[in-house]
Image (tube, rainbow, N blue to C red):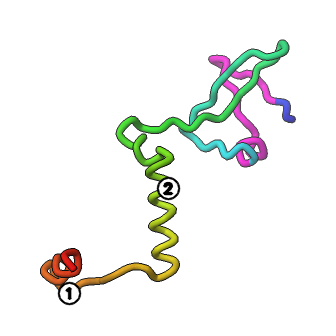
Amino acid sequence: MALVKVKQNFQITLPKSLRKQCRIAEGDYVEVAVRDGGIFLKPVKVIDEDQAYFWTPEWQAAEAEASRDIAEGRVVGPFDSVEAFIKDLES
């Protein structure tokens, strides 16, 4: 809990300890609601529409699989040429 002052234009500054604890950075969004007579702020991560595919469960599962393959050495390459790469794909 922290005490903050409402300044000009009704702005408040979140103390560093709260920003760090809630992982809030400059430019982030917070959802604001009234609860039990008080104001509740909740950090919200907004995802660009053209990046939303990356956060789907299917894409994240594929990313996790790729990371495991890399960590366990199940990768090929690098290739000396495009032709060598294509040859490996066709095999």
Image quadrant in which you'd find residue 37: top right
Q: Classify 69 as above or below 84.
A: above
Classify mark 1: helix, strand or loop: loop
Q: Quadrant of the C terminus?
A: bottom left
Q: Furthest residue to the front?
A: 91
Residue 40 in the image, given as x and y percentages of width and height? 75, 24
The amino acid on which the numbered mark 1 sits, given as a three-letter code, is Asp
Classify 10 Å Cα crowding around label 1: few (below 14), some (14-19), many (20 and above): few
Residue plotted at (67% across, 46% down): 23
Residue at x-position 78% and y-position 25%:
5
| Residue that sits furthest to the top in the current view | 37
Q: Nearer the viewer, residue 64 or 23?
A: 64
Q: Identify the image quadrant of the N terminus.
A: top right
Query: Residue 83 vs residue 19: left or right?
Result: left
Q: Which residue is mark 2?
A: 61
Tell me the magenta residue range: 4-20
Question: For residue 39, which quarter of the picture?
Answer: top right
In this rendering, the label closer to the viewer, 2 or 1: 2
Q: Is residue 91 above or below residue 24?
A: below
Name the element at disc 2: helix
Residue drawn at (50%, 56%) of the image: 61
Q: CA distance from mark 2 to mark 1?
A: 30 Å
